[in-house]
Amino acid sequence: MNTIPFSLEQKMHQVIIEKLSLKDFEQWLYQNDELESTNPDLYFELISFDYSRESSLDAFRLSFAKYVGFHKFEADLIKEYLYSIINRDGDYIHSIRMLYEFYFIGYEFLQKLGLSYGLWVMHAQTSDSNGDVNDIVESYYPDIVYDTENALHWLESGKIVFKAEKCDLGGFEYDDLRSEEEKIKGYVITMEI
């Protein structure tokens, strides 16, 4: 398989996860002439693709997902959720819940965030408890910001590096280059009674 420019891989990834419309991708494709010279076969396949059909997104995923190294974008995806929590923008309550989901698929570096915050949001949203999820989330601040900034630092400084291989739990394998002190900051501390 010929290599493809990272910019194309990134745009294809954005389409697949629905952050970029097929129409916008098609416009970008015709404005970018780099691909034609680096991978003419893929370029021909992309310009021949019918972007106008209702089922085009599914067909795009089936045809072009094989060119995307999803692990390359995993840190960016997690960082989006972390920034949402810090800034309380978008659906930051969903972002908190997603921390448990990420921990559950094998991202041990998110243990504290996933179990101390995400699991409790998930429980509150799915139980018949009388507690209001907004009140629960409000009680997390400012502690959750400190813990979230730690995880964000590990991702931004390259201390967590995702690999192409999947782990047994469904997430990507990763190299954990944090110090022992940093690792402790990411774990839930339990005490025996």
Image (cartoon, grey):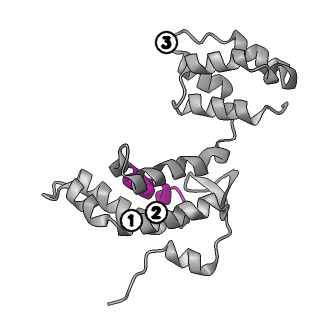
Badge 3 marks a residue whose secondary structure is loop
Q: Which residue is mark 3?
A: 54
Identity of the amino acid at label 3?
Answer: Glu
Q: Residue at x 71, y 17 (%)?
A: 31
Foreground mark, 3 or 2, reads 2
Crowd rating for badge 1 (residues with CA inside 10 Å; few <14, some 14–19, many 20+):
many
- Left or right of residue 54: residue 120: left
For the C terminus, which image quadrant?
Answer: bottom left
Q: Quadrant of residue 162?
A: bottom right
Q: Which residues are magenta?
A: 95-107
Question: Is 83 situated above or below 33?
Answer: below
Badge 1 marks a residue whose secondary structure is helix
Question: Is 35 situated above or below 74?
Answer: above
Closest to the observer, 10 or 61 = 10
Residue 123 in the image, given as x and y percentages of width and height: 28, 58
Identity of the amino acid at label 2?
Answer: Thr
Crowd rating for badge 2 (residues with CA inside 10 Å; few <14, some 14–19, many 20+):
many
Identity of the amino acid at label 1?
Answer: Ile
- The disc placed on residue 144 is 1
Give the distance between the C-alpha atoms of the residues marked 3 and 2, in whole angstroms.
Answer: 39 Å
Q: Residue at x 71, y 10 (%)?
A: 48
Residue 105 in the magenta stretch? The answer is: yes
- Left or right of residue 107: residue 176: right
Q: Are marks 2 and 1 in contact (CB under 8 Å)?
A: yes
- Left or right of residue 153: residue 132: left
